[in-house]
Amino acid sequence: MSGTTHPGAGCLWPMWDHSEKPDHHYCGGKRLEGQSYCSNHYVKSVRSSEEEKVPFVPHYSYQKKAA
């Protein structure tokens, strides 16, 4: 897996699949000025007003294990 767990001033695009438990690896690439993402991920993060709005629902279950 590429990316970093400590992006610092780098791109904050999550690098894990939404069907997986988050592992907190981020792109870490150079951010666009005033943005949270690099140029590649910024383009992916913006939708046009004509695109269908679909709510994000993660596939991973966050249920705690019984003790």
Image (cartoon, helix red, strand yellow):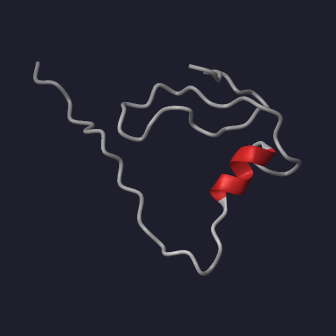
Q: Position of residue 8 (x, y in %)?
A: 75, 27
Q: Along the horizontal axis of the image, is 58 left or right of 39?
A: left
Residue 38, position as x, y percentages in the image? 77, 42
Please say if 16 is above or below 36. above
Q: Nearer the viewer, residue 5 or 29?
A: 29
Residue at 27% in and 37% down: 62
Image spot of residue 51 (x, y percent)? 56, 75
User: Quarter of the image containing the C terminus?
Assistant: top left
Q: Quadrant of the N terminus?
A: top right
Q: Is residue 45 left or right of residue 31?
A: left
Q: Residue at x 63, y 40 (%)?
A: 13
Left or right: 59 in relation to 63: right
Which of these two is toward me, 6 or 26?
A: 26
Residue extending farthest left: 66
User: Camera-side residue: 1 or 67?
Assistant: 1
* 10 shown above or below 43: above
50 is higher (above) or lower (below) than 61? below
Q: Residue furthest bottom?
A: 50
Q: Residue at x 43, y 31 (%)?
A: 22
- Residue 41: where, in percent of width, then height? 69, 46
Residue under the image location 43 percent in, 68 percent down: 54
Q: Quadrant of residue 4?
A: top right
Task: Judge from the rendering whether residue 51 lies leftward or rightward of residue 40; answer left or right.
Answer: left
